[in-house]
Image: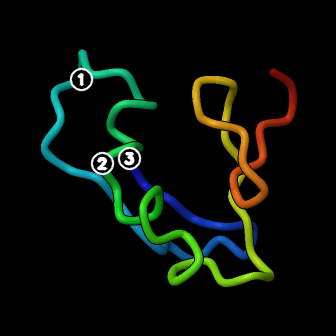
Amino acid sequence: LVILPHNLLIVDYGLGFPGSVHDAYAFQHTRTSREHAELLGNQHWIWSDSAYPSEPWCVVPFK
């Protein structure tokens, strides 16, 4: 799992989960999900698919 905001700079990544683990579960264990303000700041956000939580900093196009 690699996390990068709209400027395409990698800010976080998650390793160590087997392929059978759902992406949303792996995302919950990343630093970004816990400390998004520190990593992304107020001006950045990330795109995600509908499996992820819809937050002001985590944009889910349609859910």
Q: Would residue 12 be found to the left or right of residue 50 on screen?
A: left
Which badge, 2 or 1, is on the more N-terminal residue? 1
Q: Residue at x 49, y 72 (%)?
A: 10
Give the vertical position of 10 relative to 63 (above or below).
below
| Mark 3, residue position | 1
**Do labels 3 and 1 touch, CB within 8 Å?**
no
Give the vertical position of 14 relative to 62 (above or below).
below
Q: Secondary structure at mark 3?
A: loop
Q: Quadrant of residue 46?
A: bottom right
Q: Residue at x 50, y 59 (%)?
A: 3
Q: Secondary structure at mark 1?
A: loop
Q: Residue at x 13, y 44 (%)?
A: 16
Residue that sits furthest to the right in the current view:
62
**Do labels 2 and 1 touch, CB within 8 Å?**
no
- The residue carrying pointer 1 sits among few (fewer than 14), some (14 to 19) or many (20 or more) residues within 10 Å by Cα, namely few
Q: Would residue 61 be found to the left or right of residue 60 on screen?
A: right
Report the amino acid beneath label 1.
Answer: Gly
Give the vertical position of 28 relative to 21 (above or below).
below
Which badge, 3 or 1, is on the more N-terminal residue? 3
| Mark 1, residue position | 19
- The residue carrying pointer 2 sits among few (fewer than 14), some (14 to 19) or many (20 or more) residues within 10 Å by Cα, namely some
| Mark 2, residue position | 29
Q: Quadrant of residue 53?
A: top right
Give the vertical position of 41 relative to 6 (above or below).
below
Gap between marks 2 and 3 measured at Cα: 11 Å
Q: Would residue 40 be found to the left or right of residue 26 on screen?
A: right
Q: Position of residue 32 (x, y in %)?
A: 46, 63
Report the amino acid beneath label 2.
Answer: His
Q: Secondary structure at mark 2?
A: loop
Report the amino acid beneath label 3.
Answer: Leu
- The residue carrying pointer 3 sits among few (fewer than 14), some (14 to 19) or many (20 or more) residues within 10 Å by Cα, namely few
